[in-house]
């Protein structure tokens, strides 16, 4: 039994990022997604749906936090990073170091941007990103996510310990919320968007109705005068020129 203790301890130390998404920040369109195949027993379809809802909720939202941690079920937690018109989101166990999760997202963000520039150039990657209409259009980036995720499997490894010691980013200022609070805010924002859209439509209808009423009022006011003038001209024409 004693001989298996280190192996058991090492197994419990392995806690990779379980889900990874990269999406367009303007509308939450997922561009690539990855699941850790050997460690995703606690990841449910509900978690995947929550990830998509978070991304949609961020789409085009003014004042959204650039970094946020979101508690969810099964002792799991989402972390997201908004950078370069992209949202990078991951799901980890709650015990996974928060600082390391954001270091992972930083590396994913750097690698994805580098891939975009290599494929479309410095001046073309933003256009390629903005004009993409199909979800998961950048699925080939999945291989890069797999390689990066392997580097972050064990938080206690020498490589990751060094990363944690060298990172000077202030993570204490990163807010932490509950999944219900975030999704409820997303629903409210969506409702506000729908109300705004309906108000725009109604205002257009009102504008057209106001123009119609103005025209009718002008006809009612000046119509008889114009008709009388036409009649007088007609009578004079008949009398002197017919």
Image: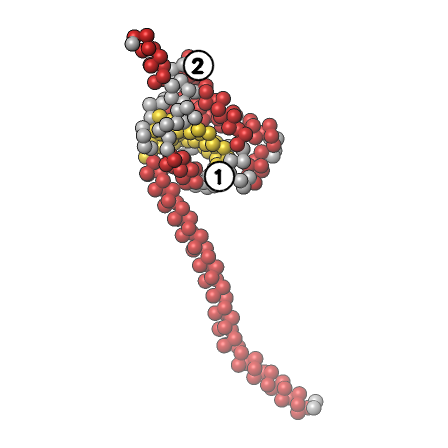
Q: Residue at x 54, y 36 (%)?
A: 137
The answer to whether residue 119 shows anywhere in this view is: yes
Q: Check whether the beta carbons of the residues at disc 2 and disc 1 lie within 8 A of each other.
A: no
Relative to 122, 63 lies left or right:
left
For mark 2, what is the residue?
A: 159
Give the Cα distance between marks 2 and 1.
33 Å
Q: Secondary structure at mark 2?
A: helix
Report the number of numbered marks.
Answer: 2
In the rendered image, the residue lying farthest to the front is 1
Q: Residue at x 55, y 26 (%)?
A: 114
Label number found at residue 42: none
Closer-to-camera residue (12/127): 12
Q: Residue at x 35, y 12 (%)?
A: 7
The N terminus lies in quadrant: top left
Relative vertical location of residue 178 with respect to residue 190 in this rendering, above or below: above
For mark 1, what is the residue?
A: 29
Closer-to-camera residue (120/171): 120
Q: Secondary structure at mark 1?
A: loop
Relative vertical location of residue 47 with respect to residue 94 in this rendering, above or below: below
In the rendered image, the residue lying farthest to the left is 1
The C terminus lies in quadrant: bottom right
Relative to 159, 121 lies left or right:
right
For label 2, the crowd category at 10 Å Cα-Cα, with few meaning under 14, some 14 to 19 and many 20 or more, is: few
Instruction: Give the percent coordinates (x, y) of residue 68.
Output: 38, 31
């Amino acid at each position: 039994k004693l001989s298996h203790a280190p192996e058991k301890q090492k197994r419990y130390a392995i806690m990779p990022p379980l889900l990874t998404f990269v999406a367009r920040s303007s509308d939450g369109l997922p561009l690539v997604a990855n699941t850790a195949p050997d460690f995703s027993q606690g990841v449910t379809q509900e978690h995947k749906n929550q990830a998509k809802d978070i991304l949609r909720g961020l789409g085009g939202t003014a004042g959204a936090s650039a970094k946020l941690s979101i508690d969810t079920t099964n002792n799991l937690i989402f972390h997201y990073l908004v950078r370069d018109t992209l949202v990078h989101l991951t799901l980890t166990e709650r015990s996974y170091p928060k600082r390391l999760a954001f270091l992972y997202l930083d590396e994913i963000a750097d690698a994805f941007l580098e891939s975009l520039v290599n494929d479309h150039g410095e001046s073309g990657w933003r256009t390629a990103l903005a004009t993409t209409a199909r979800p998961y259009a950048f699925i080939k980036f999945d291989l890069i996510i797999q390689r990066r995720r392997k580097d972050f499997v064990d938080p206690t490894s020498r490589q990751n310990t060094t990363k944690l010691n060298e990172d000077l980013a202030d993570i204490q200022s990163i807010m932490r919320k509950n999944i219900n609070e975030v999704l409820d805010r997303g629903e409210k924002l969506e409702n506000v968007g729908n109300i705004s859209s309906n108000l725009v439509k109604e205002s257009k209808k009102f504008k057209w109705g106001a123009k119609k009423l103005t025209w009718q009022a002008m006809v009612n006011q000046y119509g008889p005068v114009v008709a009388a003038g036409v009649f007088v001209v007609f009578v004079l024409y008949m009398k002197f020129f017919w």
